[in-house]
């Protein structure tokens, strides 16, 4: 069930910015200790990135063990 919600969440975050992707990226991490997965999503600005990352790690709809989820916002090329 966790993955069923994660993919639409990531798509919803990425689609509005796909046509006008800036140089800010949201890196999200999720997964078990031995099988983590990481994904980058282009964002319009740093504020949007920080808000989306905070929403991701605080979501109770996903796996509740927040110590295995995280995010980072960074500037890229």
Image: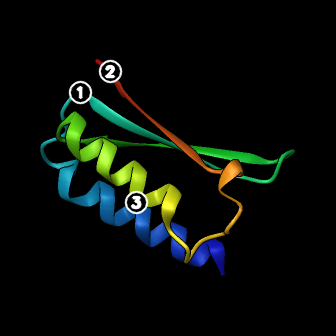
Which mark identifies residue 45? none
* Disc 3 from disc 1: Cα separation: 21 Å
**Do residues under tags 1 and 2 come within 8 Å of each other at their CB atoms?**
yes
Relative to the observer, which residue lies in front, 62 or 77?
62
Q: Earlier in the sequence, mark 1 or mark 2?
A: 1
Tell me the quarter of the picture where residue 76 sits. top left
Q: Name the quarter where the N terminus is drawn.
A: bottom right
Which residue occupies 57% across, 44% down?
A: 70
Give the SS element for disc 2. Answer: loop
Q: Within 10 Å of the Cα at label 2, are there few (<14), some (14-19), or many (20+) other Cα atoms?
A: few
Tell me the quarter of the picture where residue 24 sits. top left
Which mark identifies residue 23? 1
Q: Position of residue 31 (x, y in %)?
A: 72, 53
Q: Name the quarter where the C terminus is drawn.
A: top left
Q: Which residue is mark 2?
A: 76
Using the image, determine if residue 6 lies above or below residue 22.
below
Relative to the observer, which residue lies in front, 71 or 39?
71
Which residue extends farthest right?
A: 34
Give the SS element for disc 3. Answer: helix
**Do residues under tags 2 and 3 come within 8 Å of each other at their CB atoms?**
no
Give the left or right position of residue 24, taking residue 68 as reference.
Answer: left
Q: Which is more foreground, mark 2 or mark 3?
A: 3
Q: How is the image coloured?
A: rainbow
Using the image, determine if residue 69 lies above or below residue 73.
below
Q: Earlier in the sequence, mark 3 or mark 1?
A: 1
Which residue occupies 67% across, 47% down?
A: 37
Q: Within 10 Å of the Cα at label 3, are there few (<14), some (14-19), or many (20+) other Cα atoms?
A: few
Q: Which residue is mark 3?
A: 55
Which residue occupies 23% across, 27% down?
A: 23
Give the SS element for disc 1. Answer: loop
* Disc 2 from disc 3: Cα separation: 22 Å
Q: Which is more foreground, mark 3 or mark 1?
A: 3
């Amino acid at each position: 069930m966790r993955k069923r919600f994660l993919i639409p969440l990531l798509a919803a975050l990425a689609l509005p910015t796909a046509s006008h992707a800036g140089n800010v990226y949201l890196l999200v991490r999720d997964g078990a200790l031995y099988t983590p997965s990481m994904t980058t999503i282009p964002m319009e600005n740093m504020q949007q990135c920080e808000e989306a990352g905070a929403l991701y790690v605080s979501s109770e709809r996903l796996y509740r063990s927040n110590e295995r989820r995280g995010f980072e916002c960074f500037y890229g090329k």
